[in-house]
């Protein structure tokens, strides 16, 4: 007698097998690198997190203001983050606490740290602690205040490298750098100019010591030519969890300005899809259109929160002053990161995502309320017939940074000069969103191969 499976169990079996087949195997990282984790000469690794990638705590008390509790993420507008100048003058204020590992079930850095520790056999080092000669595999975390100019973090990085050399007892020892998102801008600047502020120079003076301090650099999801999404944030605020960090808070931070599209990139288009001459770094372009901190909406919120009209007017003037100052410094910062450069022996790898359509161009749109810059096709109001706005405005990337920006491509070469970006030892792109790049196991596989290869 032939026994047949009933229809439903057979169907369930097919679905189960299909599910198994669709679930890709993960690389066995421990086995892949078990023979490479005993090299005594392995350089220490410095991890540089991205924007909002560290906690911010009150100096002295340790009270966490960013990100805070789940309730804070759900209900706060994080206005305390903007109130730092007076507190810092008085010796208080906020300082980085530790990595922002994740929230709820979303991991940002936890799996990456686990791979470094369990697979790479690195231990977290603390600056100032001597490293014994028989136990030298260390990684360090550059915790920086991501509200401030990246130049401050660059100087911290220089001090950290010098301290690590002292801790190892080796004044000539190079380090490896793993830099995520905004962290890659910090590493890029450091390799070019060291701890020096060159932004006010007519011709940026290069620094020739980078290769003496750094062996390899990984740039993960780094907006080397900026991100168009920064234009939206400076007009509308920054969405975090269920809330939006409002414009009047965001403009007190320098880093959102330093991630604006490169000054030479023609990222603003007409509704017909043609590039137009629009200088996003000109504060008057924002002022006359009443965008960002020049808008009536922001003014109304600031005045309503102020104890009196005079204080409100002073706060508005301060916010607008921040905006103008940060915009001017950010333009010079972007130009400095695209000056001709020689690698001088540093090996640079770019890893990132390129499977998500990512805002690449902004349209100068108009409706009954006036002009605005929009970066999403569905937001264009003054639509021209025959224009495919999705194809026009969105290009492959990780949802936040385009592939071309991650690779530092898209600017015209300067005749007779070296390239504007470091020659790449390798690049690797995968299907992952920006905030999940660091925890992707296939990225971690390529990262460890790059760092541990002799």
Image: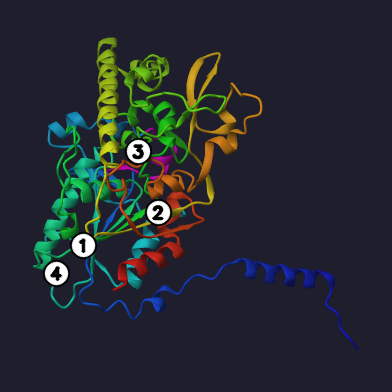
How far apart marks 3 and 2 lie (CA) works out to: 20 Å
Helix, strand, or loop for circle 3? Answer: loop
**In the shown orientation, is residue 90 left or right of residue 232?**
left
Q: Mark number for residue 131? A: 4
The image quadrant that residue 108 belongs to is bottom left
Q: Position of residue 378 (x, y in %)?
A: 59, 31
Say if mark 3 contacts mark 4, CB within 8 Å.
no
Mark 1 is surrounded, within 10 Å at the Cα level, by few (under 14), some (14 to 19) or many (20 or more) other residues, namely: many
Q: Nearer the viewer, mark 1 or mark 2?
A: 1
Q: Mark number for residue 259? A: 3
First-in-chain label (3 vs 1)? 1
Say if mark 3 contacts mark 2, CB within 8 Å.
no
First-in-chain label (3 vs 2)? 2
Q: In the displayed image of the protein, which residue is found farthest to the front? A: 416
- Quadrant housing the C terminus: bottom left
Helix, strand, or loop for circle 4? Answer: loop
Given residues 5 and 139, the one toward you in this image is 139
First-in-chain label (1 vs 2)? 2
The image quadrant that residue 346 belongs to is bottom left
Q: Nearer the viewer, mark 3 or mark 2?
A: 3
- According to the picture, the residue beneath numbered tag 1 turns out to be 175
Quick check: is 195 in the magenta stretch?
Answer: no
Helix, strand, or loop for circle 1? Answer: strand
146 shown above or below 170: above
Q: Position of residue 311 (x, y in %)?
A: 25, 15
Magenta stretch? 64-77
Given residues 386 and 367, the one toward you in this image is 386
Q: Mark number for residue 108? A: 2
First-in-chain label (3 vs 4)? 4
How far apart marks 2 and 4 lie (CA) works out to: 28 Å
Quick check: is 72 in the magenta stretch?
Answer: yes
């Amino acid at each position: 007698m032939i026994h047949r499976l009933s229809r439903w169990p057979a169907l369930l079996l097919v679905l189960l097998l299909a599910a198994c087949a669709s679930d890709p195997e993960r690389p066995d990282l421990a086995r892949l690198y078990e023979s490479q984790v005993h090299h005594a000469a392995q350089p220490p690794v410095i991890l540089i997190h991205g924007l909002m990638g560290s906690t911010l705590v009150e100096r002295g008390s340790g009270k966490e203001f960013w990100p805070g509790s789940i309730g804070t993420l759900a209900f706060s507008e994080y206005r305390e983050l903007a109130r730092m100048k007076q507190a810092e003058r008085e010796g208080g204020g906020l300082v980085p606490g530790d990595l922002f590992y994740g929230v709820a079930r979303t991991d940002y850095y936890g799996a990456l740290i686990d791979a470094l520790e369990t697979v790479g056999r690195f231990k977290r080092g603390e600056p100032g602690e001597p490293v014994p000669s028989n136990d030298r595999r260390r990684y360090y975390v550059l915790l920086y205040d991501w509200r401030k100019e990246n130049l401050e973090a660059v100087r911290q990085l220089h001090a950290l490298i010098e301290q690590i050399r002292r801790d190892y007892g080796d004044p000539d020892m190079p380090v490896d750098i793993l830099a995520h998102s905004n962290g890659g801008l910090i590493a890029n600047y450091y390799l070019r100019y060291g701890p020096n502020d060159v932004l006010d120079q007519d011709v940026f003076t290069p620094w020739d010591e980078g290769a003496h301090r750094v062996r390899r650099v990984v740039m993960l999801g780094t907006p080397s030519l900026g991100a168009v999404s920064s234009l939206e944030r400076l007009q509308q605020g920054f969405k975090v969890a269920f809330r939006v960090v409002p414009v009047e808070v965001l403009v007190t931070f320098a880093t959102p300005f330093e991630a604006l599209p490169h000054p030479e990139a023609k990222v603003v288009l007409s509704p017909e899809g043609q590039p137009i001459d629009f200088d996003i770094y000109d504060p008057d372009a924002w002022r006359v259109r009443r965008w960002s901190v020049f808008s009536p909406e922001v003014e109304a919120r600031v005045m309503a929160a102020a104890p009196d009209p005079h204080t409100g007017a002073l706060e508005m003037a301060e916010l607008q002053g921040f905006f103008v100052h940060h915009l001017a410094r950010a333009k010079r910062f972007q130009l400095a990161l695209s000056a001709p450069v020689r690698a001088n022996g540093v090996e640079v790898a770019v890893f990132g995502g390129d499977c998500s359509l990512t805002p690449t161009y902004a349209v100068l749109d108009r409706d009954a309320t006036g002009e605005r810059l929009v970066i999403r096709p569905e937001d264009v109001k003054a639509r021209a017939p025959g224009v495919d706005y999705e194809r026009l405005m969105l290009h492959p990337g990780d949802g936040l940074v385009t592939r071309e920006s991650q690779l530092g491509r898209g600017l015209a070469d300067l005749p007779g000069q070296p390239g504007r970006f470091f020659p790449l030892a390798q690049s690797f792109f995968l299907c992952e969103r920006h905030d999940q790049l660091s925890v992707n196991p296939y990225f971690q596989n390529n990262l460890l191969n790059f760092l541990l290869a002799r």
